[in-house]
């Protein structure tokens, strides 16, 4: 029996917890107690959580204890999972870190939440984010910014900063985020954890509050690459309620991964030339080159690959994403749910204007306006139309590159975690920081952020592995082999 | 100056599927407000649309019935505007790539109206304005619609109404819509402009909304044509605008002028893949397509020897047409098809309208009607009696034979019995006899009326006529 008094943070992976809970070696109640206490101590310091209450957890534990006795198949038995607060949960509010949805409680569980619960996971709370997932630092939250556990004066990245920070601080072994232009990979890199953005359509978006529908994808954070596989296996799959969800998903990834040999013989890896250019911090550049050497030592062949159209990715992304957002956020009008102005209004139009003015933050308004403009009659062809063209070009160049090599390798971000407030006054610099991640969303490809070193400030550095559609298993196998050489990131712990 | 109107119609036809276009909610008419809603059709955060396959099948059926070209790939788009009855802030519709282009609606043997396109879209909810507050019923939000857009080729209000009747008859015939104007499952907007007779240049058009009956379509278009003619003859200009028709005053008036200059900011719906319609699917639906109204009318005229007008009246509603055919069959050749047609058109359909019968299961079913008409055919009852028996059947649900026997309505064809009554009436009315003998043939009617009254209508009218004339002529000959 695991002695809970001796239970240490960072001790077990989700995979290990689940195994011990199933075998009866670890009591769900003891485990929850541990994580509850730890959350109470640290969540407010990091501001990683928007919602954390014992009551819905208690209800889940009771149900789970019964299912354990019934010997149900529970691949994530007792594993506490944190959910980014733009993914719907019927027993907890879903705010999108917006005043607009401050008191909003969905009537249903998102598909992924449903799947996690069925697998025996405990939904442990909701994490902070940039409002409606719009941002790269988790500073655009109506609940205040989340802090980076490695340096509390720095941002955790975004928009899924709450999930990344919480996993880095072991407030849960795994968490879900969403990635529209890098919102899982970049915070994973800033916080020194793994972050997987699956293939577009691999995980149902049903219940993910839409930001940019053609780019949004739910994925996971973990400190152990096998845990990423475990969660992916649980949440991926066809969902008839999402018409963009794909069929024929690979299964049994995590078991294969546990037994995988660290052998990358014949694997062709391409370094994306355009993403190692100017603006990239020196230490990041060298950390990734070292990582490439390590992969080579495992049998991989390293190539130089060019995707010239990546230079259009920032402008293409910020036109398409904002255009879709301008429509997706039109439903928040104060009529049916969400924030409605308390001021006296004399017309419907005024009700709309006041409610939206008060309910949305600055960045959200900015993006709605950008997108509205991009779709306006007379401008459509020049903006949305051109951006879609560029997107097709980027996509075809990515696919071509992925015919030449199996995996593409690049930095996740040109910098490590920056200081709070450092970029808030200059949105363009903030947008340019997304250069390494945006193309993947535009092309709908899977990509994994892998911790691969430290800069001079002791901040984590991440590398990005990009694969062909539905090649998540290959990405994870590659990361697992790399982890075998450099040692598990589980062993690194921020001092909190 | 002589003007001619140019009219194009946009019809929103609700597809009669069991569930809504993008969710599983029921589509029953008249449910309690907001009782046929779910998180999807309410546009709750995180929800996604899933296209109803049956609605697409219905839409394909419609496209095939009008001979439109079904696109292998078409695109759903978001049409954006703010209104409380629109839960997502956009309507999912089709814009530059609809699923069907072209097609024609045959109005009668000579007239047809060409279509520009048909597309699939979702309906909005309904605002209900009370004195103190406005309420919204989202039951209608997400209902499947086919929007049928005609070319501006209609030349009069009457032609517009005829086109709508044919189109409604068509959609009901092929079973894709109730085509019910009162319940809003068949709605029409009209684009009206006028131009100098023979001019190739179109005038400025106005769109009239809120036309909820065929009669109002005609009234509104006629009013609008007059309004535009007055404007132009007075030297003013027609301003392009959206108008609402007010049925009470019979006038059109501009809608909220600001809200019509919408920029809808259409763009492809990212939550739905391209709509792919395979040839196999088209073939399957083509095979299911029933005989269309006009083809059926042609067949009825030929097969049953009916006048064209009867054939058209009978085929406007497929249930009426089926009822007619079943009735003819049940009569087994003992009653002329024309008689059956007269009865269906003149008695059954009006009775169905008055009593709200479902023509698939009318109170007087085809075999009861046939029983009645057979009694008429063999001369057991006269056609006048047959009508009262028909009424009695509706009232009591009794079989025609029973009614005839119970009320003693069997037609008297016994010549001596008839002759006796005729003799009585002649003897009782010497003045009229004198008039007849003086050459006034009209008094024959008087005698027939008297004889029928005395016999309670049971005398065989043919025999009454011949015996009456024979008896009267005997008087002339001085017998």
Image (spheres, rainbow, N blue to C red):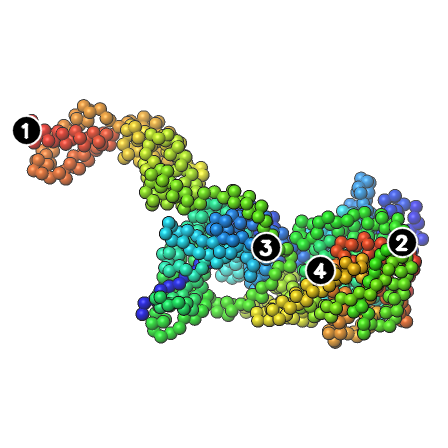
Image position, residue A390 (x, y; %): 68, 67
Report x, y in % for residue A372.
62, 69
Using the rendered view, name the quadrant where residue B463 is placed: top left
Q: Residue furthest front?
A: A404
Q: Say which residue label 4 marks.
A: A216
Q: Nearer the viewer, mark 3 or mark 1?
A: 3
Q: CA distance from mark 1 to mark 4?
A: 109 Å
The answer as to whether the residues below labels 2 and 1 share one chain is no
Q: Is residue A89 left or right of residue B169?
A: right
Image point 70% across, 70% down: which residue? A315
Query: Who's the residue at 52% across and 58% down the image?
Result: B127
Q: CA distance from mark 3 to mark 2?
A: 45 Å
Residue B242 horizontal/vertical position (percent): 46, 65
Residue B426, quarter of picture: top left
Q: Chain of mark 1?
A: B
In front of the other: B310 or A231: B310
Q: Residue at x 22, y 31 (%)?
A: B462
Which residue is tagged 1?
Answer: B478
């Amino acid at each position: 029996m695991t002695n809970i008094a001796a239970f240490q943070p960072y001790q077990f992976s989700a995979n290990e917890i689940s195994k011990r809970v199933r075998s009866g070696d670890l009591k769900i109640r003891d485990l929850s107690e541990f994580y509850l206490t730890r959350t109470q101590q640290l969540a407010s310091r990091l501001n990683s959580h928007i919602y954390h209450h014992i009551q819905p957890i208690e209800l889940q534990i009771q149900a789970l204890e019964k299912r354990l006795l019934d010997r149900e198949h529970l691949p994530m038995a007792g594993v506490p999972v944190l959910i980014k607060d733009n993914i719907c949960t019927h027993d907890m509010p879903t705010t999108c870190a917006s005043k607009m949805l401050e008191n909003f409680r969905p009537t249903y569980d998102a598909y992924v939440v449903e799947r996690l619960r069925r697998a025996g996971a405990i939904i442990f709370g909701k994490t902070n984010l940039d409002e409606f997932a719009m941002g790269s630092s988790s500073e655009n939250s109506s609940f205040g910014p989340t802090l980076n556990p490695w340096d509390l004066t720095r941002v955790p990245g975004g928009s899924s900063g709450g999930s990344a920070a919480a996993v880095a601080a072991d407030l849960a072994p795994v968490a879900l985020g969403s990635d529209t232009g890098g919102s899982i990979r970049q915070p994973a890199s800033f916080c020194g954890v793994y972050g997987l953005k699956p293939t577009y359509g691999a995980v149902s978006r049903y219940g993910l509050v839409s930001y940019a529908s053609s780019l949004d994808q739910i994925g996971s954070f973990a400190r152990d690459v096998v845990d990423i596989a475990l969660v992916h296996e649980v949440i991926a799959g066809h969902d008839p309620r999402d018409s963009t969800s794909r069929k024929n998903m690979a299964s049994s990834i995590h078991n294969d991964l546990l037994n995988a040999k660290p052998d990358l013989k014949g694997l062709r890896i391409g370094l994306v030339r355009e993403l190692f250019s100017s603006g990239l911090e020196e230490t990041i550049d060298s950390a990734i080159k070292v990582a490439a050497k390590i992969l080579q030592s495992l049998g991989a062949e390293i190539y130089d690959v060019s995707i010239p159209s990546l230079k259009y990715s920032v402008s293409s992304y910020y036109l398409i994403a904002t255009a879709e957002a301008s429509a997706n956020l039109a439903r928040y009008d104060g009529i049916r749910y969400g924030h409605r102005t308390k001021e006296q209004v004399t017309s419907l139009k005024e009700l709309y204007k006041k409610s939206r003015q008060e309910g949305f933050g600055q960045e959200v308004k900015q993006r709605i306006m950008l997108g509205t403009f991009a779709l306006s009659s007379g401008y459509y062809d020049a903006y949305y139309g051109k951006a879609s063209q560029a997107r097709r070009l980027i996509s075809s160049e990515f696919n071509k590159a992925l015919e030449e090599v199996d995996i593409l390798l690049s930095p996740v971000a040109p910098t490590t975690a920056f200081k709070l407030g450092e970029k808030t006054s200059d949105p363009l610099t903030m947008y340019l920081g997304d250069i390494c991640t945006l193309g993947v969303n535009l092309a709908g490809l899977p990509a994994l952020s892998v911790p691969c070193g430290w800069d001079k400030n002791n901040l984590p550095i991440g590398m990005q592995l990009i694969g062909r559609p539905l090649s998540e298993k290959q990405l994870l196998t590659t990361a697992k082999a790399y982890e075998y050489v450099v040692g598990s990131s589980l062993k690194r712990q921020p001092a909190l | 100056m002589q003007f001619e109107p140019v009219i194009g119609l946009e019809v929103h036809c609700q597809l009669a599927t069991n569930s809504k276009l993008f969710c599983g909610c029921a589509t029953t008419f008249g449910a309690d407000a907001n009782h046929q809603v779910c998180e999807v059709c309410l546009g709750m955060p995180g929800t996604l649309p899933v296209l109803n396959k049956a609605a697409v099948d219905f839409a394909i059926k419609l496209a095939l019935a009008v001979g439109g070209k079904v696109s292998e790939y078409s695109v759903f788009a978001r049409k954006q505007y703010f209104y409380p009855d629109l839960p997502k802030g956009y309507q999912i519709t089709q814009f530059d790539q609809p699923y069907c282009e072209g097609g024609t609606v045959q109005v009668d043997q000579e007239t047809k109206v060409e279509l520009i396109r048909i597309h699939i879209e979702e309906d909005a909810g309904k605002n209900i304005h009370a004195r103190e507050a406005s309420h919204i019923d989202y039951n209608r939000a997400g209902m499947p619609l086919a929007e049928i857009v005609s070319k501006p080729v209609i030349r009069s209000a009457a032609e517009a109404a005829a086109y709508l009747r044919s189109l409604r008859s068509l959609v009901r015939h092929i079973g894709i819509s109730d085509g019910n104007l009162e319940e809003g499952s068949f709605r029409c907007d009209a684009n009206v402009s006028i131009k100098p007779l023979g001019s190739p240049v179109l005038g400025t058009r106005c769109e009239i909304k809120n036309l909820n009956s065929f009669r109002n379509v005609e009234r509104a278009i006629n009013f609008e044509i007059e309004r535009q003619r007055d404007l132009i003859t007075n030297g003013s200009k027609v301003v392009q605008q959206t108008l609402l028709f007010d049925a009470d005053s019979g006038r059109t008036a501009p809608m909220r002028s600001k809200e019509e200059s919408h920029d809808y900011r259409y763009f492809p719906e990212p939550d739905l893949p391209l709509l792919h319609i395979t040839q196999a699917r088209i073939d399957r639906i083509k095979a299911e397509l029933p005989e269309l109204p006009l083809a059926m009318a042609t067949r009825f005229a030929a097969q049953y020897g009916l006048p064209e007008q009867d054939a058209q009246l009978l085929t406007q509603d497929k249930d009426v047409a089926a009822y007619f055919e079943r009735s003819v069959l049940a009569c087994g050749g003992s009653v002329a098809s024309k008689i059956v047609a007269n009865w269906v058109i003149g008695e059954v359909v009006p009775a169905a309208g008055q009593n709200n019968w479902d023509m698939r299961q009318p109170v007087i079913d085809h075999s009861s009607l046939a029983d009645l008409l057979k009694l008429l055919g063999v001369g057991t009852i006269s056609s006048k009696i047959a009508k009262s028996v028909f009424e009695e059947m509706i009232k009591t649900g009794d079989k025609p034979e029973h009614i005839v026997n119970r009320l003693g309505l069997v037609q008297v064809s016994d010549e001596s019995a008839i002759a006796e009554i005729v003799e009585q009436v002649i003897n009782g009315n010497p003045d009229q006899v004198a008039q007849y003998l003086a050459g006034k043939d009209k008094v024959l009617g008087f005698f027939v009326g008297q004889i029928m009254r005395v016999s309670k209508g049971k005398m065989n009218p043919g025999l009454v006529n011949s015996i009456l004339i024979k008896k009267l002529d005997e008087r002339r000959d001085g017998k």
